[in-house]
């Protein structure tokens, strides 16, 4: 991938309590390479790579945030044509701006926000760095899914902000929303029902594509991860598992049906 049209997830970034241990976990799990870029005294912004191509990144959370009890987490970025215009629209549509819009050197311009449903996401207007260099390949970000407690509000927000179209698809006894760009699904959304613990906030879940869900989940546990949702088959989709890495960040792996 050399460029991303508006509305496509283009980048993923891990903010972790322990950069060294987090780096060891993910490189062992997915066989990623790394490129450590200094950003301070003994601090690095690490490009996670597949065959020398950047596919995601990670960095260590500031100690102040760790002391405040902020959890390690993956942040997903959506490509937009004009991040400043999106910032104005996002506030108009009920979002809370966390950071930006601001330049990230010459790489691009970003905005981080909390949507009206309470989930955090980032927007990216790429310049020298457009985003993930590989799309729909093994060991790369493959799918993004919004878990929200108010699907109506979340649906309206993202469709208005990004021009997404939505389509309801019945799945496993629930209505699953597909977000579409040019007629192709780019993300999903599900409603958090009473079975979800109250302490779990609305969030965007990242899925990494793997060739075998069960073996990857087992390997992750051997490396110290916790299994949140055991390997589960979704008809016509594939098999997935939800994991919590040793530093506390939650992510999913998916083995597609094809």
Image (tube, rainbow, N blue to C red):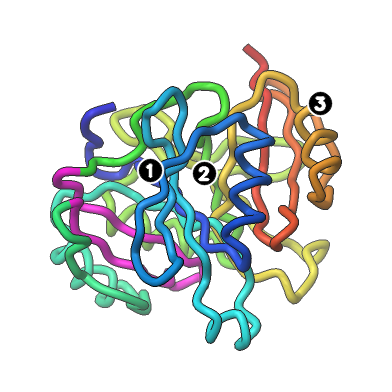
* Left/right of residue 148 with respect to residue 192 in the rendered view: left
The residue that disc 3 covers is 215
* Left/right of residue 214 with respect to residue 20 in the rendered view: right
Residue at the spot 29% in from the left edge and 27% down from the top edge:
1
Q: Does the rendering let one see residue 46?
A: yes
The residue that disc 2 covers is 144
Magenta stretch holds residue 114: yes
Q: Nearer the viewer, residue 142 or 48?
A: 48
Alpha-carbon span between mark 3 and mark 2: 22 Å
Residue at the spot 47% in from the left edge and 24% down from the top edge:
136
- The first of marks 2 and 1 along the sequence is 1
CB contact under 8 Å: marks 2 and 1: yes
Mark 2: few/some/many CA within 10 Å (<14, 14-19, 20+): some
Q: Nearer the viewer, residue 150 or 237?
A: 237
Q: Position of residue 240 (x, y in %)?
A: 73, 34
Q: Does the rendering let one see residue 228?
A: no
Which region of the structure is painted magenta? 107-128
Q: Which mark is residue 54?
A: none
Q: Position of residue 204 (x, y in %)?
A: 54, 56
């Amino acid at each position: 991938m050399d460029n991303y049209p508006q509305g496509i997830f283009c980048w993923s970034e891990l903010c972790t309590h322990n950069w060294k241990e987090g780096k060891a976990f993910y490189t062992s799990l997915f066989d990623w390479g790394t490129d450590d870029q200094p950003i301070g005294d003994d601090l690095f912004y690490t490009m996670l790579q597949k065959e020398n191509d950047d596919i995601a990144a990670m960095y260590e959370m500031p100690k102040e945030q760790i002391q405040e009890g902020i959890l390690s987490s993956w942040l997903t970025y959506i490509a937009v044509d004009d991040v400043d215009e999106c910032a104005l629209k996002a506030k108009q549509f009920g979002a809370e701006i966390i950071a930006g819009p601001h330049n990230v050197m010459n790489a691009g311009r970003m905005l981080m926000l909390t949507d009206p449903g309470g989930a955090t996401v980032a927007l990216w207007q790429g310049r020298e760095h457009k985003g993930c260099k590989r799309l729909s390949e093994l060991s790369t970000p493959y799918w993004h899914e919004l878990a929200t407690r108010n699907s109506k509000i979340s649906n309206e927000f993202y469709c208005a902000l990004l021009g997404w179209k939505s389509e309801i698809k019945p799945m496993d006894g629930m209505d699953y929303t597909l977000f579409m760009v040019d007629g192709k699904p780019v993300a999903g959304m599900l409603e958090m029902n009473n079975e979800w613990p109250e302490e779990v906030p609305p969030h965007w879940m990242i899925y990494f594509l793997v060739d075998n869900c069960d073996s990857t989940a087992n390997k992750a546990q051997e490396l110290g991860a916790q299994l949140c949702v055991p390997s589960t088959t979704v008809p016509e989709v594939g098999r997935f598992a939800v994991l919590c890495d040793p530093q506390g960040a939650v992510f999913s792996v998916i083995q597609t049906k094809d």
